[in-house]
Amino acid sequence: MAGRRSIDTAGVVQLVGAGVLGAAAWAIVFAGGLFGPHFGVLPAVVIGIVAAGTGILALWWSWEQWGGRDVVVMVNRWIRERAVPQAVPEEVWMPLLLKRERSVSKSWAMLMLVAVELPLAILNAVDAGSPAERFLWVATIVLWGCLAFWIPYSNLRRLPVIRRLIRARRAA
């Protein structure tokens, strides 16, 4: 079929993970008692399904901003292999690598948000009034903690490689 894109297994796993993350975010809010007493089971399940769909659509939309899943995989391969194939014209690789460099650089701002939110979540977890509220704050701590690890880890690995690729291909 012309124009039809396929998604690799890793992409399917990422979409499922985005759906699970969206549903889990709703489950944390619901279990935290913020909405629990006001909702029945059916509305909570429907909202959970909508939250899962929102997670999937958000990931799909981010892929489309790059030109599709295949473009994301291609750029990731260039970064992982630390080389852009010579057959790829500059009009293709340069905008993609510059866009990825800007994207990775912007994620450092998220680390500042983590630095503020993580201590606040810890303080709220210590001062929680109920087990459900404590669960909500512990889940929030886990989320911010994962971001506190992942952002520097991924940026320290990718940003220098992206910048070297841009310099090397410009010099060639």
Image: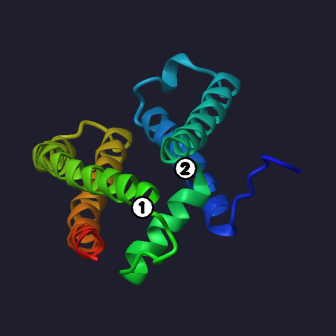
Determine whether label 2 and label 1 are within 8 Å by CB.
no
Q: Is residue 52 above or below residue 105?
A: above
Farthest residue, direction right:
1
| Residue 35 in the image, given as x and y percentages of width and height | 46, 23
Q: Is residue 57 left or right of residue 141?
A: right
Residue type at the position of mark 2: Ala
Q: Nearer the viewer, residue 96 or 159?
A: 96
Residue drawn where x is 78% and y is 46% of the image = 3
| Residue 61 in the image, given as x and y percentages of width and height | 54, 39
| Residue 130, picture quadrant | top left
| Residue 49, picture quadrant | top right
Which SS class for mark 1?
A: helix
Instruction: State the mark number for residue 54.
Output: none
Which SS class for mark 2?
A: helix
Please state, as top left, top right, bottom left or bottom right, where the C terminus lies in the image: bottom left
| Residue 8 in the image, given as x and y percentages of width and height | 69, 65
Q: Is residue 94 above or below residue 35?
A: below
Q: Nearer the viewer, mark 2 or mark 1?
A: 1
| Residue 111 in the image, given as x and y percentages of width and height | 17, 52
Residue type at the position of mark 1: Trp
Residue drawn where x is 52% and y is 39% of the image = 58
Q: Is residue 51 above or below residue 110?
A: above
Q: Nearer the viewer, residue 22 or 8?
A: 8
Distance in Å between CA atoms under marks 2 and 1: 28 Å
Residue drawn where x is 25% and y is 61% of the image = 151
Q: Is residue 91 left or right of residue 142?
A: right
Instruction: State the mark number for residue 93.
Output: 1
Q: Nearer the viewer, residue 169 or 115?
A: 169
Circle 1 crowding by C-alpha within 10 Å: few under 14, some 14–19, many from 20? some
Instruction: State the mark number for residue 18.
Output: 2
